[in-house]
Amino acid sequence: MDLVSDYIISLTHLYGLVHREKIVEIYNMHSDGEIYIEDVDTRANNIVPEFNKNHVEVHGDYFVHETIMEFDEFEQELSKRQGKPFYIPDQQELLKYKNNLYFEKTREYKALEKYVQHHFFNGDAFKAEMLCEDVQGFCQFAFSMRNIFESFNQRGVVFDNEDQVDRVTELIMNLANNTRLWENNGLTPNELSKRKTAQMNHGATTNKKVGRNEPCPCGSGKKYKKCCGA
């Protein structure tokens, strides 16, 4: 496969579903070259087996993760994303998502991993990693504190006291609020909240139109055209 195909797979894994025009936009944002809708359509028509192997299906103008299609949730998932900005990582980070199992190990994830390794698994890094990957999955796809604590129970974790339960709960909530979600176009809940607040504050103080090459008012540090204006 080529770089365009890698982008299609990576963006589908990152967002859950992605319109072919968004693929063209992000690819051209990262590259000195330029591709067009026809380039994306050619891959969609000619390398379907490779996409299927990477859990990517074509649905109309969209590339969709097979999990969404399996449960017939395309329309529902699409509606969750309406009006939300996109998280667009740099190319190096984006292409890590070609691996369907990849996720960003944030400082919040590492804090939980460090705590459970020390307090529950006597320093066993592998056991801590397995548990934290379970928790990450719940935070990303089906958050349920009950199911998360059931996962702790299944892995033999016994809490010593209520303070320990409270601390783990705090760590889990910090992780959940900083986990990239399909329904947020790859943004974490915290990132989405900050962007909305910044946009509201900006709208309340000025009606000036932001130039595409000016700093984005959301405070990301990126140019407007590469952030909320994408």
Image (spheres, rainbow, N blue to C red):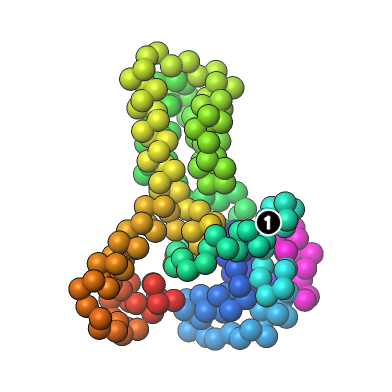
Numbered-mark total: 1
Please name the residue shown 30% across and 61% down the image: 197
Please name the residue shown 72% across and 73% down the image: 60
Q: Is residue 126 visible?
A: no
Image quarter hosting the C terminus: bottom left
Residue extending farthest to the top is 160
Q: Where does residue 15 sit, x and y in percent of width and height? A: 56, 61
- Give the prevailing secondary structure in the magenta stretch: helix
- Residue holding disc 1: 73
Q: Which residues are magenta?
A: 45-57
Q: Is residue 158 visible?
A: yes
Q: Where does residue 75 sit, x and y in percent of width and height? A: 66, 62
The answer to which image quadrant residue 20 occupies is: bottom right
Please name the residue shown 52% across and 67% down the image: 82
Q: Height in image: 202 above or below 70? A: below
Label 1 CA crowd tier, 10 Å (few <14, some 14–19, many 20+): few
Q: Height in image: 86 above or below 106? A: below
178 or 9, nearer to the observer = 178
Q: Height in image: 88 above or below 136? A: below
Give the residue type that dot 1 points to. Glu
Q: Height in image: 174 above or below 43? A: above
Q: Is residue 159 magenta?
A: no
68 or 223, nearer to the observer = 68
The answer to which image quadrant residue 96 occupies is: bottom right
From the viewer's perspective, tell me whether residue 51 is left or right of residue 210.
right
From the viewer's perspective, tell me whether residue 80 is left or right of residue 5.
left
